[in-house]
Image (cartoon, grey):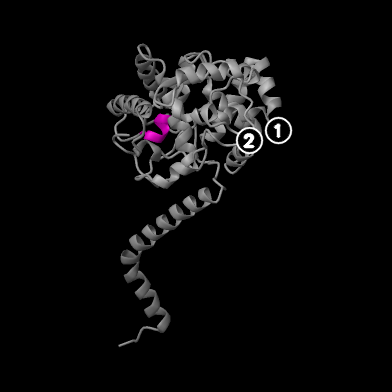
Amino acid sequence: MAMASPAGCASLERKALEPVLAPVVSAALLLVLALLRRYAFCQGSPTMSLELSTSFYANTCPDLPQIVRSVIRSEFSNESRSAASILKLHFRDCFSRGCDGSLLLQRGDGRSAKGLKIINNVKRAVETSCPATVSCADILALSARESVIALGGPSWTVEFGRRDSPATVAAAMEAIPSPNLTATQLIQSFQRRGLSKRDLVALSGGHSIGQAQCSAFSARLFNGTPGDSIDRAFKSRLEKNCPPTAPDRLTNLDPSPTTFDNLYFRALLANQSLLFSDQQLLEIDLVGFVKEFAANQQTFFTAFANGMIKMGKLSPITAGHGEIRSSC
């Protein structure tokens, strides 16, 4: 009987082991890719995805934009302030770990819960037409755009193909910019994500809509914050509306909280911003953009749209990783 050569034996062994090793290697590869993605984001080098596409659902869910727009408009017919909650959810999701829907698994304050409720209503409508097809991360990105449009703001191109993270990490919340950051800290936070100073100022214009709890800015009212140039009369009004005994009371972020416009930037130039981090946009490296957007609303709209497109590409989960959650 002919004996198999050593090389032949090795070949036979490899073929015998392939069915056993393949799942192990595949699982290990997925783990390594996930760890590399998280490490890159934590180290301040998130990737701008090139895998997203405007035509991703062209065949599997062609009516997705119309479905989302219909639900958003219906929800806002009674409560337009929820638009700010949805925009905030999308921003925080992308800034925490990348645009992967992981922040939707967090349980936050009542306003975030209201936004999440609307996102789940959108998800149910999408599931009826396109079951197990569209991720919560994509639904959130599209809902953010439709929310801004519904309040008179600009439109922008939303690319799809994100998949959902199966879990959230509480520590990721620490990566979200605080309302007490200085201009230098804000610039560093945005630049770590590949976003420019212009993007920083434009995306801060998202504060054109919505409200903030008194606790988010009470320190600048009663403790004093170095370098704060808040208008005295404006500060006095805030102190009356936000006594230390009412930390959860809500105050409008700008003079027109249910209309997406450039009044936010005009208020900034009058030193009448609600948050300390907003007032920091008047620092030398940023104030030029504030003046530009205050003078021309369309310029602001264009810059905001460009910033949202860039932010929406921050380190999404794609290419078969992650999952499509049935509920957000």
Q: Is residue 92 above or below residue 243?
A: below
* Mark 2 → mark 1, Cα distance in angstroms: 8 Å
Task: Name the amino acid, label 2.
Answer: Ala
Q: Residue furthest top?
A: 77
**Image quadrant assignment for residue 140:** top left
Circle 1 crowding by C-alpha within 10 Å: few under 14, some 14–19, many from 20:
some
Q: Residue at x 42, y 33 (%)?
A: 138
**Location of mark 1 (residue):** 285
Work out which quarter of the rendered image holds the C terminus and state it.
top left
Whether residue 233 is situated above or below residue 134 in the rendered picture:
above
What secondary structure is marked by label 1? loop
Which residue lies under the disc numbered 2? 183
Report the side of 228 relative to 121 (left or right). right
Residue 94 image label:
none
The magenta segment: 134-141
Residue 1: x and y in percent read 30, 88
